[in-house]
Each structure stands twice: as C-alpha cells, then as structure tokens.
Amino acid sequence: MKKKAVIQLELPSENFAAIVMRALQPETKRRVTSRSRVALQYKGSRLIIKAEANDTSALRASLNSYLRWIGLVRDTIETAESLSPSL
C-alpha cells in the first residue's frame, strides 16, 4: 500500500511561492529513486507538496528533502536581500 502525504505551506508572499516553485520544479521531473514521487503546486502564497512513496521511510526522506530545499531557497533570498535591499 502506498503511503501519501500532503503538506500546505503558507509562504510570505505569492512571489516567494513562485520562486520556490521554479527552483524546485526540476526536482519533480526526474525521480532519483523509484520508491517515491513528489508533485508541487502553488495557489497564491500557499505551496502544496504532494508526496507518495512505497514506504514511510521513503516518504519521510522525500518530504525532508523538499522542506530543506525550501529552507535553502528562503535563506538564499534573505541573503540576497540583505546584500542588495533594492531586490
């Protein structure tokens, strides 16, 4: 039986959600393993992560990866803004 999870994240803005979506979309196109699959979409400032995996370990690993990548995008944006406040 497949394990499934849906996570909805309310992000700071619609622009931020679009940036995260563009940054992570390539990861959804190629599957690193056959054990899981992830789909992303956004509505306004809400990012929706839909994950499906063969087992809970694969599901957890996939979700952890995407959540870490989102944090990385956030950190990158914050760093860029602090270096150039006009962005």
Image (tube, rainbow, N blue to C red):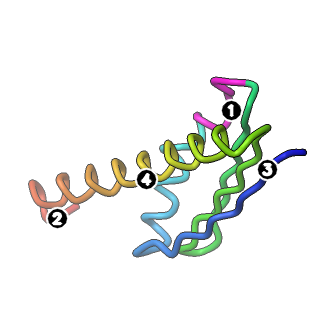
The residue at 59%/42% (across/down) is 62
Residue under numbered circle 3: 3
Q: Measured along the vertical axis of the image, is residue 15 above or below residue 49?
A: below
> What x and y, as percent, mark residue 20?
48, 54
The residue at 59%/34% (across/down) is 26
Whichever of callouts 3 and 1 sits on the residue coming sooner in the sequence is 3
Residue under numbered circle 4: 70
Whichever of callouts 2 and 1 sits on the residue coming sooner in the sequence is 1
- Image disc number at residue 29: 1
Magenta range: 27-33
Report the side of 81 relative to 65 (left or right): left
Residue under numbered circle 2: 86
Which SS class for mark 3?
A: strand
Residue located farthest toward the right when viewing the structure as drawn: 1
Q: Mark 2: few, some, or many residues within 10 Å (few <14, many ≥20)?
A: few
Q: Dots 3 and 4: beta carbons under 8 Å? A: no
In this rendering, the label closer to the viewer, 3 or 4 = 3
- Residue 45 within the segment the image draws in magenta: no
